Amino acid sequence: AQKVTQAQTEISVVEKEDVTLDCVYETRDTTYYLFWYKQPPSGELVFLIRRNSFDEQNEISGRYSWNFQKSTSSFNFTITASQVVDSAVYFCALSISNFGNEKLTFGTGTRLTIIP
Amino acid sequence: GAVVSQHPSRVICKSGTSVKIECRSLDFQATTMFWYRQFPKQSLMLMATSNEGSKATYEQGVEKDKFLINHASLTLSTLTVTSAHPEDSSFYICSARRGREPLHFGNGTRLTVT
């Protein structure tokens, strides 16, 4: 069975600070995909990133960056120079399908509040 | 723009009635769709996998007679909550698979049963 743990339930930081959201996963499969989604108050899920298990390169997209460490089964997400618009619930998710486009196992989410 | 449309976005119904939620893939055919449920301040839990032309596959603990799923066409899956009760109040969100892309999610439906 797969499991995704987001130990941080809620985080608050002052605007412009950097913040890292932790994600630890468990799976016995060697091929899997990891995701991060953003859920603003309106409820929709905004796709942020998909990373397969064979690609351990870190990724940067604007103010967002992701650190994938297979050795520790972690896929952490950092927001640099946070902005109020970053306030949302962030979910880490895991899929063991070929392209990660089958059912997802979600973590419990981290509620991020950026204080102006 | 959105590739999956979910309707309605909000619905309030009385206890004992049934409510139908639609999930449509826009401009593509989705042989497989997924239905998730999210209770307030909790994670998303997969309810069922909807397959076009066949019966849905339900996750353990999900009552298939209560949550009826119909995937009658390649662009539409419906979830009907039958004989709704207040404990069914939740946020329901669907997703559709388009090729090798990450799943596309609808905007969700907030169901309140009074």
Image (cartoon, coloured by chain):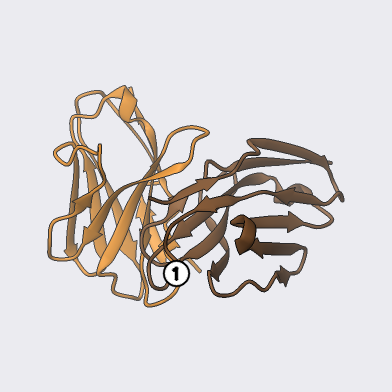
Chain colours: A brown, B orange
State the image coordinates of residue A97 (x, y, percent, origin top left).
Answer: 38, 67
The residue lying at 69 percent from left, 49 percent from top is A21
Q: Secondary structure at mark 1?
A: loop
Any part of residue A115 in sight:
no
Which quarter of the figure is the C terminus of chain B placed in? top left
**Do we see residue A17 in this rendering?**
yes
Q: Which of B61 and B114 lies nearest the eye of the viewer?
A: B61
Q: Which residue is mark 1?
A: A31
Q: Please provide percent x and percent y for residue B78.
A: 24, 52
Look at 48% across and 57% down and name the residue there: A94
Q: Residue at x 19, y 25 (%)?
A: B16
**Chain under callout 1:** A
Residue A12 is situated, as x and y percent measured from the top left of the image, at 76, 37
Q: Nearer the viewer, residue A35 or A83?
A: A35
Q: At x 70% / y 45%, what residue is drawn?
A: A87
Q: Amino acid at mark 1?
A: Thr
Residue closest to the eye, A68 or A64: A68
